[in-house]
Each structure stands twice: as C-alpha cells, then as structure tokens.
Image (cartoon, rainbow, N blue to C red):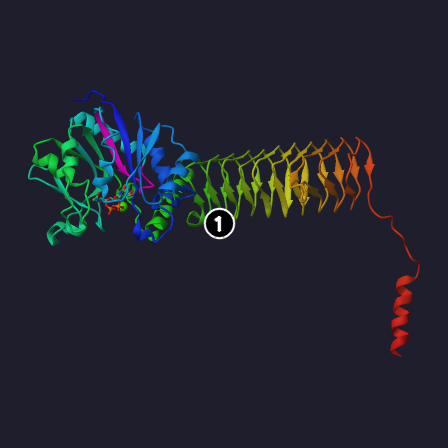
Amino acid sequence: MSTKTKARAVLLAAGQGKRMKSAKPKVLHEVLGRSILSRVLTAVDALDVEHVHVIIGHGSDQVRDFLELNRPKTPYSVHLQEPQLGTGHALQQLLPALEGFSGTLLVTVADTPLLTGETLGSLLNTHREQGAAVTLLSAVVDDAKSYGRVYRDDEGNVAGIVEDKDASPEQKLLREINTAIYCFAWPEIRDGLTSLTNNNNQNEYYLTDVLSWAYQGGLKTAAVVADDWREVAGINSRLELAEANRLMRDINVKRLALESGVTIVDPATTWVGPEVSIGQDTTIMPGCILFGDITIGANCFIGPNTVTHGPVVIGDGTSVINSYVANSQIGSHCKVGPFAHLRDGNVVGDGVRLGNFVEIKNSTIANKTNVSHLSYVGDADLGSGSNLGAGTIIANYDHLTKKKSRTTIGDNVATGSNSVLIAPIVIGDGAVVAASTAATKDVPAGALAVGRAKQVNLDNWADNKRKQKSTSLT
Ligand code: UD1
Ligand code: CA
C-alpha cells in the first residue's frame, strides 16, 4: 500500500527532564541559539502534515507562551498532560482530539535537536510503503546509554522495545536503540494505546509497549534505521546538550567550508547555527558566535570574537571585527569595529565606517558615512557622506517624559568632537556642528552651529601660579 494517507504529527514535550536539573522545561533549552523545541518543529514543518499536536505538562505556561511567539508553519494545538505518567500516557491525552481521524500519526519526542525533516520524511514514506501499523525509527549505537533496546524476531521483524531500566543483562547488550520517533496507523493502534499498563520498574505508561502489542496481535511492524545515531540522539543532561551544540557546530562548519568556500580559521571556536549562510572567500576568525538567520556576503572578514544575533544581513567585502551585531542590516564594503555594538533595528548602507566604541540603535545610515570613534547613535537617520566626530552623542531619550525622539542628519554633515545632538533635531545637508556643541535646535543646511561657552585666555595666569608655589616653599 503506498497511497498517501493523511498525516498528523505529535510532539511529546510534557516531561520534566529531571536530569537537566533546571527550572526551565528541557525542550526550551537552546542549541546554537534556538530552543530544542523549535528545532524539532522546523523538522516537522518540512513535512506534509495537516496538524501538529504538542503535548505539554511540565512548565506548560512557558512552553505555551513560547509556541505563541514562535508559531510553527503547520497548524498546531497544545494538549495538557497533568500529571505526567509516561510517554504512553502522553499520547493518550490525544484520544478526544483524534476522534474521527484516520491516517498516520508521526509521533516524536521533543528533545532531539538535530532531527531533520529528511529523516522524518523517510520514516513517513517507509511507513506508508510498508503499510505497517507501527514503523519505528531506530539507530545502532556503540554505547546504548539509557535508551530503550529494540529486539527483533528470527526473521528480523521488530518484536518490541525494552526500557533500559527493565532490561535483562542480556537485553542490555543489544545495540539497536529506540529513538522514540514512530509512525502509527490510526485508529489501528488505538486499542494498544488504551490498554497500556504501568506494570514496570518506573510505574509509567510506556508508549514503547504499543509496539509489542501490535507485533503480538499480528499487526505489521517495520523499522527505519537512522543513518547517523547522533542526529536522533535525545538530550537528557547538560552534558548531552553541550555535545549536541558541538555536533551541530561541526555539521555547519563543514557545510560552510566544503560547500560555500568559507575559510573558518578555528572550527572549534566558531559557533555557527544551521540558519547561517556565508558567501565565497569570506574568512571567519576564531571566537565568532553567529546565531539566528544570518546572511553574510562574499569576501568578508568576520571576527575575531564577533557575535551576531539574527536576523542579520552583511554585504560583500565588509569587515566586522570584535563586534556585536543584533537584528541589523549592514551594506557592502563597510568597516565595523573593533568594539562596535549594533543593537536592534539598524539599516547601514555601503562603504560605511562604524569604529571603536560606537553604539548604534534603531537607526539608518546612508552610504559612505563615518561614525568612527566613541559615539552613540540612537533613533536617527543619517544621510550619506557625513562624518560624526569622535564622541558625538545623539541624546534621544528624555528621562523625565520617558520619550524617545528621532534625529535627522542630512548628507555631507560634519559634527565636531564631543558634540551632543539633542533630539528631536534636524541637521540640514552640508551643515557643520562645532566641537563640544550641545545642539538643541535644528541647524539649517550649510550653516555652522556653535553652542559652547566662549573661550577666555588669562595672560600669564599659569606662570604666576607656578611662581607663587615656588616662593612659598623657600
Ligand atoms: C524514551 C523512550 C526510550 C527511548 C528514548 C529515546 C519510553 C518509555 N522510552 O525514553 O525507549 O530510547 O526516549 O530518546 O518512551 N514525555 C511526555 N510525558 C511524559 C513523559 C515524557 O510528554 O509523561 C516526553 C518528554 O517531554 C520527552 C519525551 O517524552 O520529550 C521522552 O521522555 P524522556 O523522559 O526523555 O524519555 P527517555 O527516558 O529518554
Ligand atoms: Ca529522552
């Protein structure tokens, strides 16, 4: 039977994850800047499924809020499992929601951050092709840790799964493990699910027992063995979380180096997420952390120690040295850093220079403008070819009214060192603001604004002081 049945996905995400020793639900812990849950949902989104049921329980408010903010593409619903009495009990929570449904249930644990849509897709295809009641995704490992072990009959059919805590010494030697990712034919396995017992060493209702129920009842069971067990590994402790980070980093470094022609000087200290794309002949120096949707052009020089939080776009030939960039766009042939801080919401043109100790927030900067030293630019629109002198500060925030105001700076404007532009303010094209000016009103195009105390020179004042000092000592 290879006709395409309707399919729904189920994510089991109600468990506490005791071994994480965390107040946060396990599935909200992050791997390379994104939660495990959202990584699993991305894999599910790649499939043609009509709905995702997410079983929540431990930390349910946090998981619910997270899903509201990070909605999967596939329509979803949450189902509360309270108390959490095991993976079988988790799926039982869906009995009302599955009333009338007929098709494939793709059930996955939600603690597998490296899971891909491809793997889930091939599980779904095999399940449909074989017309099985249960198709299991298994993996062959050297160290079976605490995984459930898969046992087969003499003909190689999957006969059941025994949990590590219930396994005999002989069964513990088995090296084929249960990934806890399955396809079930619904409603064919319904009776198996409702008849589960908790008669085991953990007093839990194990979803795994549905498999032996199906086998013993003469229903067809099948298995897909994962190509690489590491992709389907469940995270149970912080050490395994760290391992998953390393593994995902290695996969991404390899992809960028081998497929995109990127020089990654030190793979071990370059933390790039799977959402990162980088152009040819760009060099990534040690210590970079590139998380989120990041697109970096060709011939760029990034790092050392540059941190980006996506979405970030960086054009060709730009360097970003020792800097932090969040949710911003930077054009081509720019020089950023060392020690620049681009906070959220900036759009920077081409050939722009943002130098050391410069902070930019929610601003647009047109081509070939320089903000080279020790400046704050917040809520401002800067024209092209302008130069903000060292220490220019845009005072965008009124502490008393708690209001932020915008600043507009035209083309070819020059501000002197230590000038303060008090927003809201407009500086016209070609205007000059003298050093140390506190500009409180608009400056017309082509004008000079000077707003500082006039200098007074007191002749011989310093010499006289020194003389006084030396006579008092004698
Ligand atoms: C489970 C499997 C084991 C498999 C392993 C793979 C069972 C009984 N065991 O064990 O065979 O080798 O996964 O990683 O299924 N959950 C709920 N409600 C609960 C309990 C758990 O939703 O009441 C969810 C958790 O949030 C988690 C997943 O189910 O995402 C797995 O739970 P976990 O406690 O990690 O199971 P394992 O002991 O790893
Ligand atoms: Ca697990």
> Front-most of 216 and 259?
216
- Does residue 165 appear to the left or right of 276 in the view shown? left
Q: Is residue 104 magenta?
A: yes
> In which quarter of the view is residue 380 placed?
top right
User: Is 335 in front, or is 38?
Assistant: 38
**Residue depicted at 73% across the width and 40% down the height:** 422
Q: Quadrant of the N terminus?
A: top left
Q: Position of residue 76 (x, y in %)?
A: 34, 30
Residue under label 1: 287
Q: Is residue 415 left or right of residue 365?
A: right
Residue that sits furthest to the top in the current view: 3
Q: Is residue 287 magenta?
A: no
Which image quadrant shows ligand 1?
top left
Q: Give the amino acid type for the residue marked by disc 1 in the picture.
A: Gly
Quadrant in which the C terminus appears: bottom right
The quarter of the picture where residue 150 lies is: top left
Residue shown at 20% from the left, 20% from the top: 3
Magenta range: 103-115
